[in-house]
Image (cartoon, rainbow, N blue to C red):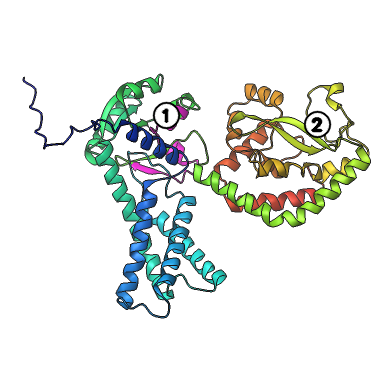
Amino acid sequence: MPAPPEPELDEGELPRGEIAPGTEWLVTRAGRQLNWLWQRGFRFLFVLDAVGLLVLMVAISIARFGFAWPTYPLSHYAVGFSIAAVIHLTVGYFAGLYEREPRLGSRPWLPRVTVATLMAIGFDGLMAILLNRFLMPRFSLAVFGIAAALLLAANRRLSRYLARRREGPPRVVLIGSPDDIATARSHLADSDREAVVVATAPGPDALADLVAETRASDVLLLDGQGLDRVFPEPLTTLERSGVGLLQRVGAQETMLGLQSVREVAGLPFVKLRAHTLPSHKVRLKRNLELVFLAALAPAIAPVVAVTAAYVRIVAGSDVLYRQERVGRDGEAFEILKFRTMVRDAEAMTGVVKAEKDDPRVVRGCRWLRATRLDELPQLWNVVRGQMSLVGPRPERPELAASYAQIIPGYERRHELPPGLTGLAQVQGGYDTDPEYKLGHDLQYLVNWSPVLDVQIVLRTAWVVLARRG
């Protein structure tokens, strides 16, 4: 059969996919800049939402007042509308509205968008109090809250439609038994007709190669048998490549209390991630901790100074003690503490886990360890981003390596910067087995929220005051 003729092109028009001569450097440079922005959280959806919100606020004002807006000059409204738009975009980002979504399947956006919009409206009111000026008339703000939720939900549907037009239909790999694959095929044909099944396999072995060969955009795990063979690889590699990996939710998985479930071909799936916390939550946690430290700095600084002077008098020079610990993603860093043990303590015993009544502790410094005041210099580690206020406690590299060999999944506790305190420290005791502490650490990662961090900080204060742990 002869090949179909090439479509005729207008004068000066290039075939699809080709770049005009002399512009290769511009396209390459633009691609690098966009990739740099994308890796740091930028989405074109930001622009779409910003324009839509500003247009919406102007439209509401015109509908109410025509073109003669009352009370304030137009510059007042322009500043107020801009502040409101920034507030809504910021709240939306930290609510996860700009996380990259798999190309396959869908989940309802309106409930999530509504909650984020209500939070943003609350911040709009707070800003009005702080600035002693409303960002827009109060009735307009109420109407804007309702309309903004509908607009943002519609923008996500529009963005998904445009992505499909630009990138083509989802290319799917099905992993599972022949019966499961047949069922998934039939459901895809009924509900996701654009999706193309490019490959099938009984298990996830050599999955990364299969995805590369078929240029797949999504992988569906149709049973739970292969989960232990996709983490951390090839899940991490696929996630970095923008390939969605989804696990079908069956009767057993529902007992785990899964909440973020999406529909694919009429079947429930959950998106698998190499990291438990998405990037917007990691950034939110970091920003909240910096604000907290800045607010408490005037109260913390004198305590640090007095404690340092006490250690200098009781333990002598070398007030600070530096020790290598395992940080985020397994990278080593140097932790800071007030020295409470005799000099060169490990020269006598080697690398061993500190005991509750460790004989190496300097007389007069035991109470510093009991009250956790010896950990205060680690606030500098928090400021530098090496640690968090709350998170899994950092461990020595030698001990972490030994735990990783005998405790499956131990490396997952390194997904976040380690913390000054953590759930394992308030739930367990000083001598709690590392495997049980790991359970608390992973539970913290899965259920993280600002409220949980506040609870752990308050419970840590109680543990210290009660001299428990």
Secondary structure under tag 1 reads helix
Q: Answer yes or no: is residue 421 visible.
A: no
Q: Is residue 149 left or right of residue 199?
A: right
Residue sitting at 36 percent across and 67 percent down? 57
Q: Residue furthest bottom?
A: 71
Q: Is-magenta flag for residue 465?
A: no
Q: Residue furthest front?
A: 22
Above or below residue 242? Residue 69 is below
Question: Marks 1 and 2, how far apart in space?
Answer: 40 Å
The quarter of the rendered structure image containing the N terminus is top left
Residues at circles 1 and 2 in contact by the CB criterion of under 8 Å:
no
Q: Position of residue 238 (x, y in %)?
A: 42, 29
Q: Name which quarter of the figure residue 208 lies in.
A: top left
Q: Given the image, on which type of amino acid does mark 2 rest?
A: Ala
Count of picture labels: 2
Residue 133 shows which numbered tag? none
User: Sequence order check: which comes first, mark 1 or mark 2?
Assistant: 1
Secondary structure under tag 2 reads loop
Q: Name which quarter of the figure residue 19 lies in.
A: top left
Q: Position of residue 279 (x, y in %)?
A: 50, 42
* Within-10-Å neighbours for mark 1: few <14, some 14–19, many 20+: many
Q: Nearer the viewer, mark 1 or mark 2?
A: 1
Residue 238 shows which numbered tag? 1
Q: Position of residue 328 (x, y in %)?
A: 61, 34
The magenta segment is: 236-263
Q: Is residue 246 left or right of residue 459?
A: left
Residue sitting at 50 percent across and 40 percent down? 256
Q: Position of residue 102 (x, y in %)?
A: 37, 39
Q: Is residue 275 left or right of residue 157?
A: right
Q: Answer yes or no: is residue 150 visible.
A: yes
Residue 354 shows which numbered tag? 2
Q: Is residue 7 left or right of residue 453?
A: left
